[in-house]
Amino acid sequence: MKIRLLSVGKVHEPSFKHGIEDFTQRINKYFKAEWVIIPTAKNAASLSEIELKKAEATSILSHIEKEDYLILMDERGKLLSSPQLAQFIQQRANESNKQLVFLIGGAFGVDASITNRAQFIWSFSPLVFPHMLARLILSEQLYRACTIIRNEKYHHI
């Protein structure tokens, strides 16, 4: 199974880049993982929130295959503990999903077409985090889940 991490916005900021890349490399020991950064629309400032979300949705959907299992990151989503996330990922692997796609949407969230396409909506917390911090948390939690699946010592109960 592959893991694709999508995020709308700017490339990884230097202060977060090392951590994101480190955890992504660690995930690669378990599952092939890659980040795809989807740039915000060039004319974003001239678009309404609805128009911007629609433009971003077109870009997002171009990076998702029909058979991909899409997990949308949203503060209104379902909360999972780290062991529950590990179980969730293992279940997807057991179901022979070829690729899990985790999506961090744009500054205003995502268009309804993306929400409707998502098979699961996951929340780290009811709090809203800056994109760079969300990327770091996502990559760390996926690595943690991988170590839980393999019964390794990274996660302490």
Image (spheres, helix red, strand yellow):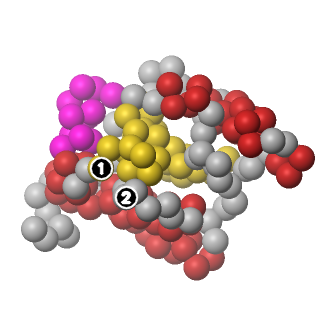
Q: Earlier in the sequence, mark 1 or mark 2?
A: 1
Q: Amino acid at mark 1?
A: Leu
Q: Is residue 85 left or right of residue 35?
A: left
Residue 145 point in image, percent of width and height: 25, 55
Residue 3 visible? The answer is: no
Q: What residue is shown at x 13% (from left), y 71% (from top)?
A: 156
Quickly name the residue at label 1.
79
Residue 38 lies within the magenta run: no
- 157 vs 93: above or below: below
Measured as percent of width and height from the top left, residue 111 is found at 62, 33
- Give how far across and how far down residue 86 sits, in percent: 22, 49
Callout 1: helix, strand or loop? strand
Which segment did they paint magenta? 87-100
Question: Which residue does the image show at 82% across and 48% down from the upper left?
Answer: 44
Q: Nearer the viewer, residue 25 or 12?
A: 12
Q: What secondary structure is found at the residue carrying circle 2? A: loop
Q: Residue furthest bottom?
A: 15
Q: Mark 1, residues whose alpha carbon is within 10 Å: few (<14), some, or many (≥20)?
A: some
Identify which residue, 40 or 130, lies in the foreground: 130
Would residue 17 be found to the left or right of residue 157 on screen?
right
Q: State how far apart marks 1 and 2 are (Cα).
A: 7 Å
State the residue position of label 2: 125
- Callouts 1 and 2 close, C-beta under 8 Å: yes
